[in-house]
Image (tube, grey):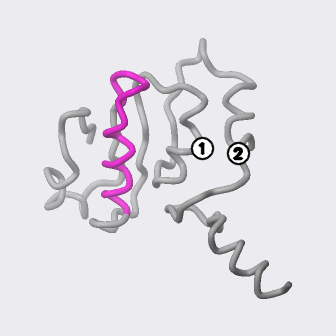
Amino acid sequence: MKLKSNQLAPELADDLGALALVAVELPKFRDGRAFSTARELRERFKFTGEVRATGHIIPDQYLFLTRVGVDTVEVPADRAGPAWEHALAEISVAYQPAQDDAQPLSLLRRHVGKQA
């Protein structure tokens, strides 16, 4: 099932149990609604299937999409390359909790403070 950028996650709520894949669309790189939709699918609706991002996505968004619960990013073959591979490793510190396993900086600070 593909959600256009103007469609909300609750529109699929009744059907999520029967879906293995939900694609969220980014019509322009500056349209962040797909980020919110992916996170809502994971957190509010506990969707465990694949969440795929499609559309106009730039490498800078790759890591952030994975942090909100996106499993795969559809990249046109003519745009794939080292920039996409580098994008996942470029930022190593998170400032807030998300769907991934990264420990937010605030929790790391508390842990370090207890050891001092």
Secondary element at image label 1? helix
Task: Give the residue at mark 1.
Answer: 63
In which quadrant of the rendered image does the C terminus lie?
A: bottom right
Q: How crowded is mark 2: few (under 14 residues within 10 Å), some or many (20 or more)?
A: few
Residue lying at 13% horizontally and 50% vertically, measured from the top left: 11
Query: Which of the pair 105/16 is nearer the observer?
Result: 105
Residue 60 image offset from top left, x and y in percent: 59, 31
Residue 19 image offset from top left, x and y in percent: 28, 54
In the rendered image of this protein, does residue 80 appear above or below residue 52? above
Amino acid type, label 1: Leu
Q: Which residue lies furthest to the bottom in this view?
A: 114
Residue 74 image offset from top left, x and y in percent: 49, 30
Q: Can you tell which quarter of the image residue 23 is in?
A: top left
Query: Which of the pair 54/114 is nearer the observer?
Result: 114
Residue 28 image offset from top left, x and y in percent: 37, 22
Residue lying at 43% horizontally and 37% vertically, measured from the top left: 53
Residue 52 — which label?
A: none
17 left or right of 91? Answer: left
Marks counted in the figure total 2
Q: Can you tell which quarter of the image residue 63 is in?
A: top right
112 left or right of 59? Answer: right
Amino acid type, label 2: Ile
43 left or right of 112? Answer: left
Task: Give the residue at mark 2.
Answer: 91
- Disc 2 from disc 1: Cα separation: 8 Å
| First along the sequence among labels 2 and 1 | 1
Foreground tag (2 vs 1): 2
Q: Contact (CB < 8 A) between labels 2 and 1? A: yes
Residue lying at 83% horizontally and 86% vertically, measured from the top left: 115
Q: Give the range drawn in magenta.
A: 26-42
